[in-house]
Image (spheres, helix red, strand yellow):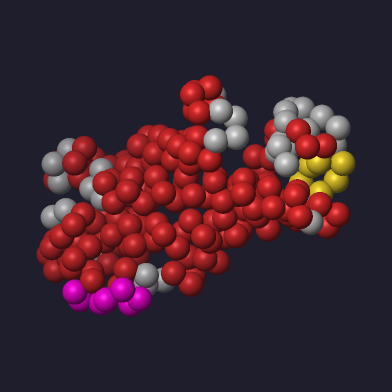
Amino acid sequence: MLFRELLGQHSHIGKLLAGSSAGATAVLLTYPLDTIRARLAFQITGGEKYTGIVHAATSIFRDEGGLRGLYRGFVPTLCGMIPYAGLSFYCFEMFKLLCMKYIPDWTCAPNSRNTGGLVLLVPAKLMCGGIAGAFAQSFAYPMDVTRRRMQLAMMSPETHKFGLGMVQTLVLIYKENGIFKGLYRGMSINYLRAMPMVAVSFSTYELMKQALNLDTGLKL
């Protein structure tokens, strides 16, 4: 609402800022849980170090500098989330506009309540969301790799070098493994995860707006 009032309802910058702000807020509030999840998942192959969520949280807080330990890797996560959330939101709106403007017979149904008189069909919602997610992930993925290395850095002495800071970790990953086998390692499987996740997220968001009789159309 704030960006809409400041920049206008159809501002591209406003859409980017809205998505980025939402993503950054979500990461800020939930990041310690993501760190704990990563530690618990890793210890399946790395030996039992934590007995559960509470034990992992208290151990990290006690042994690794309090909140600094729980938020290790937060900066690269934020640096990745801001373009990821902003681009995914922006791209979804742009793909949605293209569908409504150029191929409405295949992707839309009439809806008199919406701006433009059209509503995107569910298969088209899923398609736009999936493509938007893949596009955004392509830009943000190296930061996701950096975040994960930093989260797991204190699990063994050999990996402590990845916990010194974002820039140092990025440089180390690049020097040791390069771009495709380092910064983009696992990208293909990440597409298989991210595309359906973002597709379902945006589709659910749009369907809930429709259920509440809110405008999901666009000015064509």
Residue 199 shows in this picture: no
Q: Is residue 44 above or below residue 23?
A: below
Residue drawn at x 68%, y 58% is: 127
Q: Is residue 49 above or below residue 45?
A: above
Q: Is residue 172 above or below residue 54?
A: below
**Closer to us: 43 or 16:** 16
Picture quadrant of residue 147: bottom left
What span is in magenta?
Answer: 175-181
Q: For this view, does 189 lie left or right of residue 27?
A: right
The main secondary structure of the magenta stretch is helix
**Closer to us: 154 or 52:** 154
Q: For this view, does 91 lie left or right of residue 106?
A: left
Q: Position of residue 126 (x, y in %)?
A: 69, 54
Q: Quadrant of the C terminus?
A: top right
Q: Where is residue 146 in the image (x, y as percent from the top left)?
A: 28, 59
Residue drawn at x 26%, y 54% is: 151
Q: Is residue 179 magenta?
A: yes
Q: Is residue 158 magenta?
A: no
Residue drawn at x 45%, y 37% is: 17
Q: Where is residue 194 in the image (x, y as percent from the top left)?
A: 53, 59
Q: For this view, does 92 lie left or right of residue 102?
A: left
Picture quadrant of residue 1: top right
Picture quadrant of residue 152: bottom left
Residue drawn at x 86%, y 54% is: 105
Q: For this view, does 92 lie left or right of residue 16?
A: right
Residue 92 shows in this picture: yes
How many numbered discs? Answer: 0
Q: Is residue 113 above or below residue 195?
A: above
Q: Where is residue 219 in the image (x, y as percent from the top left)?
A: 71, 37
